[in-house]
Amino acid sequence: MKINFEKIITELLNRGFTEQYLADLVTSWGVDCTQPTINRLKNGITRMPSYELGFCLVQLHRQNRQSDRQMIRLQHCN
């Protein structure tokens, strides 16, 4: 199954996250990430992130969907 990171990031942005906040959140989990990285993924310039970044974005998306679209508290993605 191919993961659509453009869709994941767009949905998170539509829920009130910013590109910078996503980058900061992932970085706080120990995974190198910058706002330009998030932007390149969102715009399809980068199609496949590192395993660690992809895993954190998928987990964040999943957790945010389960929390009824509320901003989640900082927690480790593992």
Image (tube, grey):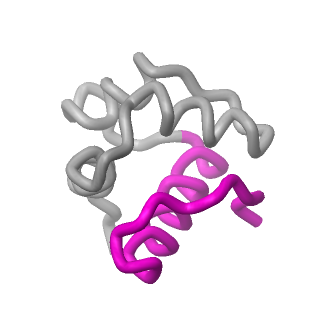
Quick check: 19 left or right of 77?
Answer: left
The x, y position of residue 14, in whole percent, is 21, 50
Quick check: 70 left or right of 52?
Answer: left
Bounds of the magenta segment? 50-78
The x, y position of residue 44, in whole percent, is 22, 34
At horizontal 68% and vertical 28% (from top left) the residue drawn is 32
Quick check: 74 left or right of 35?
Answer: right
> What residue occupies the far top of the structure in this picture?
36
Quick check: 78 left or right of 7?
Answer: right
Q: How many marks?
A: 0
At horizontal 38% and vertical 30% (from top left) the residue drawn is 19
The x, y position of residue 7, in whole percent, is 22, 55
Q: Quadrant of the C terminus?
A: bottom right
Q: Is residue 33 magenta?
A: no
Q: Quadrant of the N terminus?
A: bottom left
Task: Check the image and report above or below for 58 versus 48.
Answer: below
Q: Is residue 71 magenta?
A: yes
At horizontal 34% and vertical 63% (from top left) the residue drawn is 3
Task: Check the image and report above or below for 31 versus 4.
Answer: above
Which of the 4 image quadrants contains residue 76?
bottom right
Task: Check the image and report above or below for 30 versus 45.
Answer: below
The x, y position of residue 30, in whole percent, is 79, 39
At horizontal 28% and vertical 45% (from top left) the residue drawn is 13
Task: Check the image and report above or below for 4 versus 21.
Answer: below
